[in-house]
Amino acid sequence: MKNLSAFQLMVATCAILVIFNGCTGGSKKERKNEVVVHELSDTDMLNPVNYQSADAGYYAQKLFSTLMIYDPKTLELIPYLAAALPTVEADTVTKITKYTYEIREGAKWDNGTDITAKDAEFSLKVYKCPIVNNEQNKPYFESIYEVITYPENPRKFSVVCNKIYHINYEISGDFFFLPAYIYDSKGLLEEFPLKDFSDKYDQLAENPKVKEFANEFNSDKFQREKGFVIGSGAYEFDSWQPGVKLVLKRKKDWWGEKYKGENKAFDINVDELIYQTINDQTAALVALKGLKIDAMYGIKAKDWVTDVTQSEKIKEHYQLSTPPSMAYTYMGLNMRNPKFSDKNVRKAMAHLVDVDKIIKVVGYGLGQRTVGFVHPSKKIFYNDTIKFYAFDVAKAKQLLADAGWKDSNGNGTIDKMIDGQLTEFNITFTYNSGNDARRDAALIFKESAREAGINVDVVPQEWSIYIQNQKNHNFEMYYGAWISSVGESDPKQIFHTESINGGSNYCYFGNAESDAVIEALRTELDKDKRAAHYKKLQAIIHEEVPYIHLSAPQERIAISKRFQPYETSPLRPGFFEETFKLAE
Amino acid sequence: MSAVKTDSNQSYWVGVKRQFRKKKVALFSFYIACMLGLVALLAPFLANEKPIVCKYEGNIYFPVFKQIGVDFGMGKFPQELLNVKWKKLNYDFAIWPPVPYLPLNQDDNNTQSVSPFAEQNVPSAKWKHWFGTDELGRDVLSGMIHGTRIAFTVGIVSMFIATILGILFGSLAGFFGDENFRMSRGRMWLNILFFFIAIFYAYGTRSYILSDALSESFAGFLLQMLISIFIFIAVMGIANLIALPLKKIPYLKQHVGFPMDMTISRSMEILVCIPTFFLILLVLATVKKPNIYIIMVIIGLTSWTGIARYIRAELLKVRSLEYIEAAQSLGFSKARILLKHAIPNALSPVLIAIAFGIASAILIESSLSFLGFGSGDTVTWGALLSSARQSSQAWWLAIFPGFAIFITVTVFNLIGDGLTDAMDPRLKS
Amino acid sequence: MLTYVLKRVLFFVPTIFAISLLTFILMSSAPGDPAELMLNRAVGGDGGQASDKLAGDKAYNMLRKRLGLDLPLFYFSFSNLASADSLHKISKIDHRKTLDRLTNDYGNWKEIEAYYHSAKKLELTILDIPKDSSTTSALITLRNAVNNLYLSPNDKVIRSSFAEMEQQVGKNSQLAAASPALNATVDAYETVRQSPTTWKNYIPAVHLNGTKNQYHRWLLGDAPWFSASDDKMLSKGFVRGDFGTSYFAKRPVSTLVWESIGYTMTISLIAILITYLISIPLGVFTAVKKGTTIDQTLSTGLFVLYSMPSFWIGTMMIIFLGGGDFLDWFPPTGVADVDADDPFFTRLSMQAAHLTMPLICWTYGSFAYLSRQMRGGMLGVLRQDYIRTARSKGLNESAVVWKHAFRNSLLPVITIFSSVFPAMIGGSVVLEYIFTIPGMGGLGFHSVLRRDYPVVLTVTMFSTILTLVGYLISDILYAVVDPRISYSKK
């Protein structure tokens, strides 16, 4: 029969595939001095100013350099492109602050020219330039006003800010230096002083030269073309197969080599950094077990406990660690919702959340319960005198009853007359769809709330809508998380009343007292005095319960034993692959 | 190929039944489908946190029945049984359902996915989790039983909607074609004009009423929707009343064919081209509390074009057959011909499409759950399966729901396949 | 027939037009604001000082302008007499919602607009009041109350906000500066309440917007047609091959589509080939062996395959064959990271290994459907008279099946082939995700979630055109298969 031949063809095809596969399986390439890092998704671009995804920021740190970076171990700022930490001059009357830096001797661009104060000014111009696609971080540099250069020393300059603000210290050294000969080869921005980008922003937006520069700068080539993504970092961009992998190669004669050993910024050991995208966690774990990946972060807590730490193969080939991550999770309550406007009702909610169970069951024990927005590892700012709200259904019922919530109609759900209307205590609890851990935490709350006669609907919302509903205060209760900065955080964005309309104060938290504490904190340049303000703010937030604070999760990291033992860090993503040293 | 004789409609169905009975596999599948349907129907009695019968503090209660009553707004639980932990009560006696858990009940002693074969921390065999538990300590078997209900509802409701729409539009397009739907020119123009006006009054001016109702409750939305449909029909009725006097003008009186087939076919093309996923996301985003019923309706609203295309094609074929022409020449009205002759003939491919459609609706729901767009607090097979995907160690989370989806889908497919053979007149030996 | 085809192709134009317009409307009514999403820092944090409200608003407005979101949607809008002709100029999506609702409730847009502007003025006045220890807490109340005006069309809420503000302003003399603005706002609201023209809601009306609209910008572009323009902010429009720039990736959409379509096309074409190569012989085989145990086993087996969710099978294959704890047969991702300098056959074999598992998942489900169709078609043909004749002439069975019956029974299968076009470009979101294939399915899916409208529109347009072509082919084939179907007049 002829159809048999078709079957034969099929069998032959299969056979060929298997043989092909046999070839590749057999000839494993010899590993060079390279690190393969797993990424869940492809990054958006390599433009260090316009990027949005977090991993693009990590790559930029390898390709470009900033004045200061955080030391992964001490979490203190250390000088990188700057020769030393800046000197600060603050004028409390005019509110002008000056941060003076000197660039390291011998710091050079790839074409051999020195990096000077001019480059600092040019880079800041780009960050503040109209039409450049970095709307998301323009406000961050809002307070930087001008750069003062010193003719006697081309490497010395001062960043001038027109406000007193404790974070400015960090901001003044937190921008990537861009080589003007690449990014502005026509010198289009030269004639405009940095001041104009604050004072004459709208005029500049219409200027043809600025327009031309910005459109050029936004274009595809500065995002991903070899030869146009160039900085003063230790690595250069080599190749990018979108959605598959990105390769960075170590520069042959980098200026920083001579500073090697001085601090962590110059500790470069790896020749090639390869970022391999695998969208699916399960597939990524399989690749990890197949030794196709050298370093992986953000492993799911569930996989970590039930799979990774149990697998002999992984334990044999990988060093595992769980450094704390600078983030916290919480459940937000809408304080203007008639159900939650009473402080005691919010406290009752806090008593109904079995935080320890959530950490144990959903987070697999990989997290530390927190009282507030400060990470417990920042000992001097963390208020350890605050007592957690205990999981106590009886107490919650009592608080609710005191607040007038009783089951008057016997339907199983407590109710109260609000504005002449009988209101049943039904809550809609929202989380972003696809995040199963958040859903599970909500379901744990749902079960305990049911005992208190509260009916909770757990509703997933698509990310864009979830975000928008929070901004518009259009929610009752939601599960959220914030990533804090490694240094100090500015609570204004989340807890100041001015952030209710436009900022991130979604829960309507705040009163005159808390605002005053936040403002005092922001302008206090003495660390110890600032710590007292931080502690006070945590106490107020704990008492007012806009957030039911859950935990500060731990990062989950696996690093190949091909490298010497490596100490992971709370700095995201938890390790710095360029500093790995091959094991003997 | 010979057409089925019209006068032997009855005997045709008898024949189909006989043919179907002959197909052992299909028949067997049919029985399994009935059994699964029974499980879906009796889910609260098979798996529940409450006892079926119990004696508590001297009184005899039927909590499961009571709950059904309470759900329909009849009766209330006595104060001492409100929001209680049913398993912790001291009963004089109690008869429990075979699975004494609801899908959302969390067994704190058996969290983090306990295998059915592992030692479970339960007081006695009665409380054992026969299919294991999931991360939160929820009973998998209970989830499976209640999931059957959801899977069946998804399949049947969505296909019901799709079938109604598909048959309606498919047969209109196929039967009338581009020429056979004739009316006076005036009437046609009026109808087209009033179509937009009707949309304006039925939906445009009522858009806030409708969206308010949708975010409140689904039943309220249906009621408002019915009112809108009524307004729509009323406005169209007015158009046709106005058309009567227009007949006096000779130009407007002329009869022209309304391109029914073209209109419907083009509309179908437009619908097919809009990505279904986009539609689903959009609707889920618009409603305040997305739930499984809304997903069913969307699946139904987007999958009718397949059925419609099938019917249209069949009708294009049937339309030109001799007996329809014969019927027409005998003076039967168009509607009568449409109902009596054409649709039953085109029904066989549709029934097959429905059986396949039920299967694919279940698969779509599970894919949606997989991508995280299901409902937050409803346990469905798809939701269980997607949770299994994240913990490869917990095979029981994958095997049981996977097997359930597989059985259900296979059963409906095999029924569809059996119907294909049984109903295809060509294949009669 | 030719006229029919020409007619159909001509009809493509309005259909494509209708679909693009419908997609446009769907997108604009979808909740979620792309500008808002873009401004939301990817690493949400508390490090910034974005709460500087005016700066934030400025950035937002600039962005909306750059994206063209401040333009009206279409050349005209069909709504009612009451509805706002300048609503699109209000930048914040939530403010627009509130105002639209007010218009629906009261029907007097002019008065409502005046009310909105007086509320804005009130807000600015409040922001200008100097903050000191005595005003702080009152200012908080005032700010929240003004914000409520923007967010709620509810009469009760608005009135209670006014009451709150009046109470604060009356109490504290330092807030007196806000008093005139507050009174003006209250008056404006009262005017809205007192002169309702809700009847206007029931009169249909058409508003003209001119060519400065989003649709025009997307379809025809706003760059001049016959002279060169250096301004890169201007769009050339879809018809001139400018698909726009992705909001998220900030790259030309054409590049994005070009990058992902290659993967999708390759996999789809191979998958289709494999499916046909396996299903057609299977269909013929089961038709010839109709009713035997082999037929029944194969049919049941195929349905079993059809019923297994491919995302689950994919995962199982990765776990068991992907080189984790079990067998190391295939790599767990779908695209090989080949070096360009590797020899051709190394690259080919690597890619083949990577594609094996995805291809299996892509194909196994369609075996059942396709082979069923083939079987049905074959059975129909085998009963025809000419086959009986052929058999009676003593030709052997294999010759009868393959020489005479096969070609005729292929037609229904070819009909299905037409629906393959859109599937080819659409890809599969779930499978692409599991196997990390950067194809069209994922591109479309993520673009919808990110409200990346230019990408969504382009993907929709591509799949639309292919769907239409597929439908045309299938309709022509209907007529070819069965001469009784005719599309032309008798």
Image (cartoon, coloured by chain):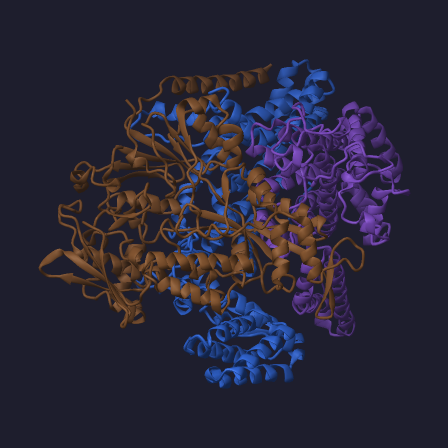
Chain colours: A brown, B purple, C blue
Residue C271, given in percent of the width and then of the height, sits at 52, 31
Q: Front-most of C229 and A73?
A: A73
Q: Splitting the image into 4 quarters, where does residue B303 fall?
A: top right
Along the viewing direction, whichever of A366 and A297 lies nearer the viewer: A366
> Vertical placement of A459 versus B399: above or below?
below
Q: What is the total number of numbered labels drawn onto the structure image?
A: 0
- Residue A31 picture quarter: top left
Vertical position of residue A2 compared to residue B329: above or below = above
Residue placed most toward the observer, C153 or C198? C153
Query: Can I make out residue C125 in this image?
Result: yes
Image coords of residue B199 (percent x, y): 68, 65
Q: Position of residue B101 (x, y in %)?
A: 74, 37
Q: Is residue C482 visible?
A: no
Question: Does C131 sit left or right of C280 as displayed?
Answer: left
Left or right: C68 in relation to B140: left
Q: Is residue A61 above or below residue A518?
A: above
Residue A166, quarter of picture = bottom left
Query: Is residue A412 toward the left or the right of residue C270 in the image?
Result: right
Q: Residue at x 30, y 57 (%)?
A: A171
- Provide residue C172's location: percent of width, then percent of height: 50, 82
Taking the view exactly as shown, the residue that stands out farthest to the front is A385
